[in-house]
Amino acid sequence: MTSLQERSRAAVWHPCTQMARLADVPPLPIARGDGPWLFDTDGRRYFDANSSWWVNLFGHSDKPLHDAIKAQLDTLPHVMLAGCTHEPAVRLAERLSARTGGVLGHAFFGSDGASAVEIALKQSFHSFKNRGRPEKREFVCLKNSYHGETLGALSVTDVQVFRDAYDPLLMRAHIVASPDGRLGNEAEALAAMRTLLAERHASIAAVIVEPLIQGAAGMVMYSPAYLKGLRELTREFGVHLIADEIAVGCGRTGTFFAWEQTGAEWPDFILLSKGITGGTLPLSLVLTTDDVFAAFWSEDVTRGFLHSHSYTGNPLACAAANAVLDRFDAGQLDANRVQAEALTRAFAPLTSRVTHLRQRGMILGFDVPDAPPRFAERFHLAARERELLIRPIGSTVYLMPPYLIDDATAAFLADAVSKTLNDVLA
């Protein structure tokens, strides 16, 4: 191992990592990034197939994003958003509201995805409390859902490896059957939700879902029809609907918000993070309605939403996010459709070797039957030898690449993935 790797093992506690494994699986010492490529300290390159945990939209060292951040750095790096305001935050909130037709017209700023989930859960409960319904304090999530790893977010997460150790500390959420396109069970999943809401709606504040794709569950995909039915149920039973678009927003599924594909009424909350700054700076947002906002409108301080982060609405991050929206205003979704088609064509030959090859927009995944022990780790290490940085989830291999795909790049990715499969399954 290099000196940097050894120093990292000694001083850095790496996330989602069993540190005892770092001797066998040392962290890649990354020196720089350029477009879809990351380069290690020896100059070897790796295609960032998972967009550095789903955040990098336009590639590393993207000039328009960096220019926006640098310009903001010269004028206002940071100011607290309590009692102050600034143009980048206001402009960003206005532009995101406009993308919902003004329905989600109020933006609360956080620092990361888990904090956005915490904010939405608190706002949902508190808004009911302010309206004289404090008993509405329960939450509903889907089986195998993932919404983050702080205590509130973990309470509505059903990935056992993350939550089991902390189970005694968590709220008790209702966990309902999740829709899965591989199982054809959407009607049954909606029926299970109806049964729960009919029984417990007087005590339930909100249902939280990952629209169209459950990421950490293994890129489980389902149809917009389920979400449309879910929205009708939450309206019927008077509970909030929280759409966690932290992973699937910002064009990943083919529309800016995944929710747009439902044709349904907007949810009560949409959460954004990850790609909103194009992989440059931490930022999250909770978008909500006039109705939720009005529940806090009072001269009484205790009825206000007293939640904050030191870097709430950081101007540098907001400038980056505005630069991201500029790209979408300029036609990024049209480009994404072409790129998604290139991925579809390139990976089609894998159908005979894997199961459930599936894709929505710029997210593609498949399952590997009879995967050997430590498949994800072995695949990750073997892929490095083929210039590919990729982290499977269990026996599910997926790609969520930057929006820099052409036919040649798609062919490279399909070839590298296929050969890595050969290496691991030999």
Image (spheres, helix red, strand yellow):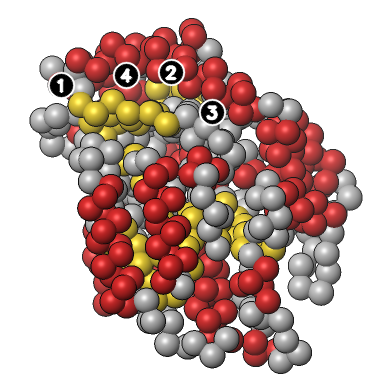
Q: Is residue 22 above or below residue 166?
A: above
Could you tell me residue 359's position as x and y percent? 38, 28
Between circles 2 and 1, the one closer to the viewer is 2
Cα gap from disc 4 to disc 1, whole angstroms: 12 Å
Q: Residue drawn 47% across and 29% down?
A: 361
User: Three-letter amino acid code at disc 4?
Assistant: Val
Estimate how packed mark 1 is, as few (under 14), some (14 to 19) or many (20 or more) residues with alpha carbons within 10 Å: some
Pick whichever, 385 or 67, lies toward us: 67
Estimate how packed mark 4 is, as few (under 14), some (14 to 19) or many (20 or more) residues with alpha carbons within 10 Å: many
- On screen, residue 357 versus residue 151, left or right, reads left
| Quadrant of res 309 | bottom right
Q: Of marks 2 and 1, which one's residue comes earlier in the chain? A: 2
Cα gap from disc 2 to disc 1, whole angstroms: 23 Å
Between circles 2 and 3, the one closer to the viewer is 2
Cα gap from disc 2 to disc 4, whole angstroms: 12 Å
Q: Of marks 2 and 4, which one's residue comes earlier in the chain? A: 2
Look at the numbered disc 3 and give the secondary structure of its residue. Answer: loop
The reply to whether the C-beta atoms of the residues labelled 4 and 3 are less than 8 Å apart is no
Q: Which residue is mark 2?
A: 343
Q: Is residue 36 above or below residue 215?
A: above
Q: Which residue is mark 4?
A: 417
Q: Residue drawn 49% across and 55% down?
A: 243
Could you tell me residue 15's position as x and y percent? 40, 51
Q: Which residue is mark 1?
A: 425
Q: Which image quadrant: the C terminus? A: top left
Q: Of marks 4 and 1, which one's residue comes earlier in the chain? A: 4
Q: Which residue is mark 3?
A: 402
Q: Of marks 3 and 1, which one's residue comes earlier in the chain? A: 3
Q: Is residue 92 above or below residue 126?
A: above
User: Three-letter amino acid code at disc 3?
Assistant: Pro
User: Three-letter amino acid code at disc 1?
Assistant: Leu
